[in-house]
Amino acid sequence: MFKLDARLAADTHWVGDLPLCHVLLMNDSQFPWLILVPRIADVTEVFELPEEQQQQLLNESMLVSKALKNQTQCDKINIGAIGNVVSQLHIHHVARFKDDVAWPKPVWGAQPAVAYTQPQSEALISTYRQLLAL
Amino acid sequence: MFKLDARLAADTHWVGDLPLCHVLLMNDSQFPWLILVPRIADVTEVFELPEEQQQQLLNESMLVSKALKNQTQCDKINIGAIGNVVSQLHIHHVARFKDDVAWPKPVWGAQPAVAYTQPQSEALISTYRQLLAL
């Protein structure tokens, strides 16, 4: 049975559920950053999903990418399926700006996170729920 | 008209062409690392592709991921669409090992590349052409 990885749960806020994936807001105020986690047990690689679920993951990834782009008017969307630390399949979507603290490097494994305040995270969760129709 | 970005061309060896993408071997002997570049002009984000091409990109990404996994028996495949330095859309596929020089961090923007010797790169190109039926 699927259970969200404890590290992912600790590092994020739950935004809502798309048909396949949990949508999570990374608790790092330095970057607009949403994570998709397919609610499928024991999967670590995208190619392990059946083809239908791969396509659904692609659809949800594009939905989230466009929501981030439209909301933030960022310079670039970074998408990553890495999973070296947390093996449960999860796909990062990060809105990047030429003046953010990590540019042009990727955000993963670099600077420590700066948590949102509760009002900040609540406002963002509400915004992304509206944008993603959750 | 599509033209491969000069930086991508300089950092890689050409392996072959799938229906949508160039397949390139990153010239870094520290990691088995293939890059897909859709042969479409002026695209920087996956969501800018028409849906049919998104699906084809997914198919080719899965083909390359499985070839890397089968060939290397790696611990994890890392997939990334970043593009902060080279904006032309390109998708990294990196076979990672728990004892590689960057583990568990991502490979991007970290340690400098260590080029293959010509015999090494020729052997790998030949291997991946066979695995990908190129």
Image: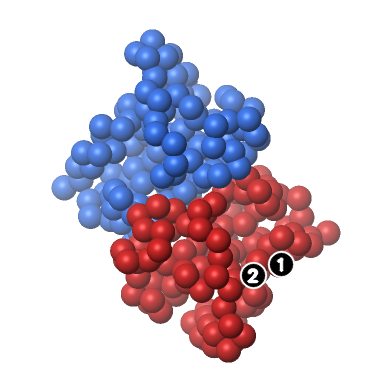
Chain colours: A blue, B red
Residue A38 image position (x, y, % from top left): 33, 45
Instruction: Residue at 66% x, 48% y: name it.
Output: B85
Q: Is residue A106 above or below residue A29?
A: below
Question: Pointer 2: what residue?
Answer: B12
Query: Badge 1, how many Cα within 10 Å: few under 14, some, many 20+?
Result: few
Q: Is residue B65 above or below residue A128?
A: below
Question: Pointer 1: what residue?
Answer: B9
Residue B118 image position (x, y, % from top left): 62, 85
Is residue A122 visible in the rendered image? The answer is no
Chain label for disc 2: B
Asked where in the image residue B12 lies, by quadrant, the reply is bottom right
A96 horizontally vs A84: left or right: right
Residue A130 is marked as none
Instruction: Residue at 33% x, 36% y: name it.
Output: A22
Asked where in the image residue A101 lies, by quadrant, the reply is top right
| Residue in front for this viewpoint, B100 or A116 | B100
